[in-house]
Amino acid sequence: MANTYVWKINDFNRDLSDGFAHTAHWAVVAISDQVDSEGNAYNSGAYGSIGLDRPKTLVSFDDLTEADIVAAVQAKLGGAEKVTEIETQLAARITEQVTPTQASGKPSGW
């Protein structure tokens, strides 16, 4: 089973005075190459918000790229180690979907 991880920026909070995007609202989704009985790929996601450091040279808000901000978010989260930890947790959730070890429900006679 292989997963694809897609990191995105959903939104920003920014200062109107200079356009500094000080808070990024991020999300990551893991998408499995395995599909369920209806043909839908197994997936799991995580999201959060994180404050960004003011750069020495401020880039115009309209010139920000998602790739640059995703990299800044990942760095603020703790770098490659934390990114791997998050992605590993998402992979574990997908594994649980594919081959469940837990269930919920009541006995059929209730």
Image (cartoon, rainbow, N blue to C red):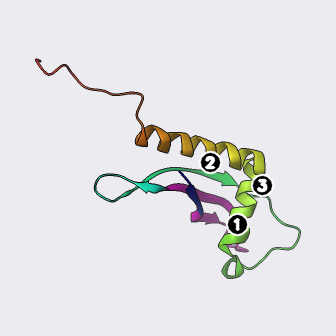
Give yes or no for residue 24 being in the magenta stretch: yes
Kindly identify which numbered label has been placed on residue 69: 1
- Circle nearer the N terminus (3, 2): 3
Q: Is residue 43 above or below residue 15?
A: above
Q: Quadrant of the C terminus?
A: top left
Residue 74 is left or right of residue 108, and the answer is: right
Outermost residue, front side: 1
The residues bearing labels 3 and 2 have C-alpha atoms spaced at a distance of 15 Å
- Depth check: give the residue in front, 56 or 74: 74
Position of 32 relative to 14 (above/below) = above
Q: Secondary structure at mark 3?
A: helix
Tell me the chief SS of the magenta region.
strand
Name the spot of residue 27 as percent of width and height, x first: 56, 56
Q: Please name the residue that numbered disc 3 is placed on.
A: 75
Residue 35, percent from left and from top = 39, 55
In front here: 56 or 2? 2
Name the disc covering residue 60, or none.
Answer: none
Residue positioned 42% across, 28% down in the render: 101
- Is residue 21 in view from this perspective? no
Q: Is residue 86 visible to the viewer in this orientation of the structure?
A: yes
Crowding near pointer 2: few (<14 within 10 Å), some, many (20+)?
many
Residue 55, image x, y percentages: 84, 66
SS of the residue under disc 2? helix
Which tag is nearer the camera, tag 3 or tag 2?
2
Q: Which residue is mark 2?
A: 87
Left or right of 12 on screen, residue 55: right
**Distance between mark 3 and mark 1 Cα atoms:** 10 Å
Nearest to viewer (mark 1 / mark 2)? 2
Classify 13 as above or below 64. above
- Give the magenta-colored segment's residue range: 8-32
